[in-house]
Image: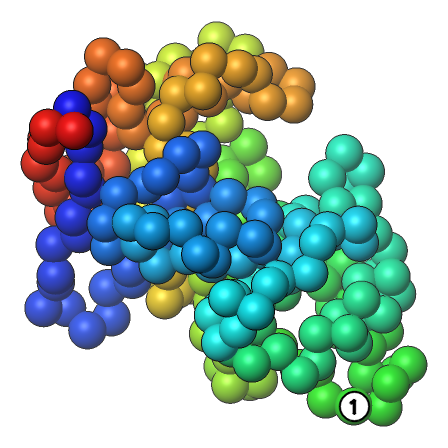
Amino acid sequence: MHKLFLPLVSNQTDRPRFGVIASGNPGLGIPWYNYIANACTQTGGGEYFPMVWGAAADRPGLACEGKPLLFLNEPEFANQANMTPVEAATLLYEYRNWSGRLYGFGAQHTSWEWFNAAMAAYEQKFRLPLPLTGIHLHVYTHNDLRLSDFTRWRLLADTRGWDIVVSEIGHLPIGETTAQDIASALPVILDMAIKELRPSYVFWFSLVNTGVEYNDGFHWSRTALYDKNGETVVGAAWMKYTRWRYRVKEN
C-alpha cells in the first residue's frame, strides 16, 4: 500500500501552491524537488522543480526544458553551495537563456546582503539585466521572523517584476525541539510568510522520514510528513493547513 497526496483546489486566488522537498516519490499533483536536476523524467512525481544545487551540480537534462528552475541552495553558507556573490553571478550567466522560469538564489531570508551583492555582481560584470524571473528563499524561525525582512523581499520582487517561491520553511529541530513543537509552530510560520511574502509556492522540508540525520542535528524524523507508521504529527498539521488530503491505494 502507498499514499497518494492530492492537493485541494482553493478558491482564494492569492493562496500559494504547497509542495514538499521529497526524499521519495511525493505522489500525484504535488509540487516538489529534491536538490537535483535530473529527475524530470520520473513518472507519478507531480510538478517537479529541477535544482542547480551549486557550482558542481549537473546541468538539467533535455526533459527539464521549460520547467521552473531553482538556482542554488544556500550559497552563502560554507556547508551548503558555498559560493561568493561573484561566483554565483558567473554561474548564473550560463543559465541566462533558461527556457522556463528561473529562481535565485536559494538564500536564507536573512541573507539580504549576499543576495544583493550577487545581483550587483551580475549586472556589473556582464552589463546585462538579471535573467531571474523570481526569488527563492528559505524561511526558518531560528533566524527570527521579522516583518522588515519580509517587506524588503516583497518590495524587491515587486520592483523587478518577480514572483517569490519559499523553497524551504519550518521550525528547525534544534536541541530539545520535538515534532510536536514543529507542528505547533507551523501555522504561525506559514501565516506570516504567506501574508508578507505572497509567494506563488511554499515547500515544506521533508516528505518522508529517511531515518538519517542531516547536518548538525537536523532530524528528518522530526520534520517528515509521514513515515512507515503513517502520517506524523507534523504531517497532520501540514495537511490541515494546506488542505491536502490523501488516499491509500493498494500496490
Asked which colour scheme the image uses, the reply is rainbow
Q: Residue at x 34, y 51 (%)?
A: 43
Image coordinates for residue 21, horizontal then vertical, percent = 44, 42
Q: Residue at x 54, y 48 (%)?
A: 138
- Report helix, strand or loop for mark 1: loop
Amino acid at pointer 1: Leu
Tell which of 166 and 9 is nearer to you.
9
Horizontally, residue 10 falls left or right of residue 184, namely left
Circle 1 sits on which residue? 128
Image coordinates for residue 193, horizontal then vertical, percent = 39, 53
Question: Could one spot residue 120 in this view of the protein?
Answer: no
**Corner quadrant of residue 238:** top left
Image coordinates for residue 83, horizontal then vertical, percent = 83, 52
Neighbour tally class for label 1: few under 14, some 14-19, many 20 plus, Cα within 10 Å? few
Q: Residue at x 87, y 85 (%)?
A: 126
Image coordinates for residue 150, horizontal then vertical, percent = 50, 60
Q: Relative to 121, is 49 above or below?
A: above
